[in-house]
């Protein structure tokens, strides 16, 4: 994803991000269709369990 806060339109099940830890990649998929709005995270930044990465507005 680009590093801007612009919204993107997604469909349910579409991959919206890929998280990497210990050389293992984990895809994050959209649970519903809508407009995805990212939280302000820099590429390569660490994230915590349960941390919001984005929100989907229908």
Image (spheres, grey):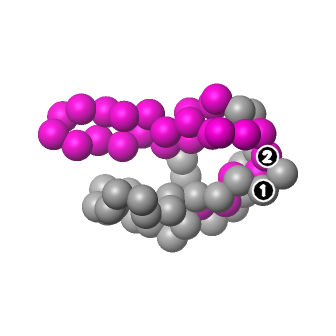
The residue tagged 2 is: 34
- Does the magenta-highlighted stretch encompass residue 27? yes
Is the magenta region chiefly helix, strand or loop? strand
The answer to whether residue 50 is above or below residue 24 is below
Local crowd at mark 1 within 10 Å, few (<14), some, or many (≥20)? few
For residue 9, what is the image quadrant?
top right
Q: Residue furthest right?
A: 58
- The residue drawn where x is 29% and y is 41% is 20
Q: Nearer the viewer, residue 34 or 44?
A: 34
The answer to whether residue 30 is above or below residue 49 is above
In space, the residues marked 1 and 2 are separated at their CA atoms by 5 Å
Q: Residue furthest left?
A: 22
- The residue drawn where x is 78% and y is 56% is 57
- Does the magenta-highlighted stretch encompass residue 26? yes
Local crowd at mark 2 within 10 Å, few (<14), some, or many (≥20)? some
- The residue drawn where x is 77% and y is 39% is 33
| Residue 30 visible | yes
The residue tagged 1 is: 57
């Amino acid at each position: 994803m680009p590093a801007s806060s612009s919204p993107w339109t997604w469909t349910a099940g579409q991959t919206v991000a890929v998280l990497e830890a210990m050389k293992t990649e984990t895809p994050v998929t959209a649970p519903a269709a809508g407009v995805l709005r990212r939280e302000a995270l820099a590429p390569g930044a660490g994230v915590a369990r349960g941390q919001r990465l984005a929100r989907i507005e229908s």
